[in-house]
Image: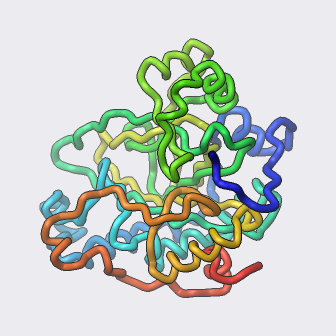
Amino acid sequence: MPHQTTNQQTVDTSIEYGDWRDELFQNGYVVLKGVIPQARCDHYIDKMFQWLESFPYGFRRDDRSTWTEEHLPTHIKGGMYHRYRVQHERFVWEARTEPGVLDAFAKLWGTDKLLASFDGINFTLPADTPLPQTQPWPHIDQNPQREGMQCVQGILNFAPNGPKDGGLLVMKGSTKLMPEFFKTHSKVIGRQTWGPTDWFGFEKDELKWFEDRGCEIHKVCADPGDVILWDSRTMHFNCVPTSQNIRSLVYACYTPASFATPETLQKKAELFDERVGTTHWPHDNVFKCSVEKMRPDEEAEGASKRLFEEPIETEQVLKLAGKIPY
């Protein structure tokens, strides 16, 4: 059964708001243009380069011969980083507290009393040889037994992201069909995992069910400073680049603090103090989450316990982290 949360009144997605929220509710995703200033995007890209250079593997931004696996810390699917406590690096928390980003999520949920997810980053570097394409893993990140929109995921995008630059793919229009799918495919619910209730992966023939009903897979493109939002009930997955461009972003989700139980807030605060990453969910599924196998030398060096720059614990950060109440 899904986890229980307190004082939870989710957004009514059936009415029209006359702004970008309508597109999110209709298609399951939306791109918000120019949320983060260009200078700030440049800052975050610079910080990601500094972060990679801080490891003892010889990576240097001005030497393309070092842009190879042996010079990089552990990552998956091109450049997704979830280890090394990167979720709590200073630049990641700086990105999470960008005013335009917080304003967007406050508008979405109707409150500025928000919790932030402790999610990772993506810094995919172009390679001399094409990156190996990963198998698609279309999925949703919200249990079909939960009612209404309870989690909206976000990408804070810092570099140009076109059709060949890798990134988010969504099954456009799938969100509204999820109740019907799970009603007519009741036997598949036992496959869900994560939390253990909020991750469900789709098989190839199940994608066809959605396509037969007018849905289509769409690569979401974005400019520097754009924010991509998608409903966790929207089928989505990722692809790696086929271009020679950098992909740079922070994954960030926010939900109302009122959605969390006191027990979850306490656990979230403890994990913040430990500088531990969790899942996409800010108010639930709050547990240690790391999906990569580490390099053998990293295990010996304790690389998972490192931070390049500690976050600045402002009042805003502490509230978003669940450490102090609103």
Q: Residue at x 63, y 37 (%)?
A: 144
Locate residue 316, reporting x and y percent: 67, 80
Locate residue 168, reporting x and y percent: 47, 42
Locate the N terminus and report the quarter of the image it occupies: top right
Locate residue 54, reporting x and y percent: 26, 78
Task: Say above or below: 256 vs 199.
Answer: below
In which quarter of the view is residue 252 placed?
A: bottom right
- In the image, 314 versus 83, the foreground residue is 83
Task: Say above or below: 134 vs 87.
Answer: above
- Along the horizontal axis of the image, is 163 left or right of 16? left
- In the image, 274 versus 111, the foreground residue is 274
Residue extending furthest toward the top: 212
- Along the horizontal axis of the image, is 81 left or right of 315? left
Locate residue 171, reporting x and y percent: 55, 30
Q: Residue at x 72, y 67 (%)?
A: 257
Q: Residue at x 70, y 41 (%)?
A: 24
- In the image, 66 versus 72, the foreground residue is 72
In which quarter of the view is residue 178 placed?
A: top right
Q: Residue at x 66, y 25 (%)?
A: 177
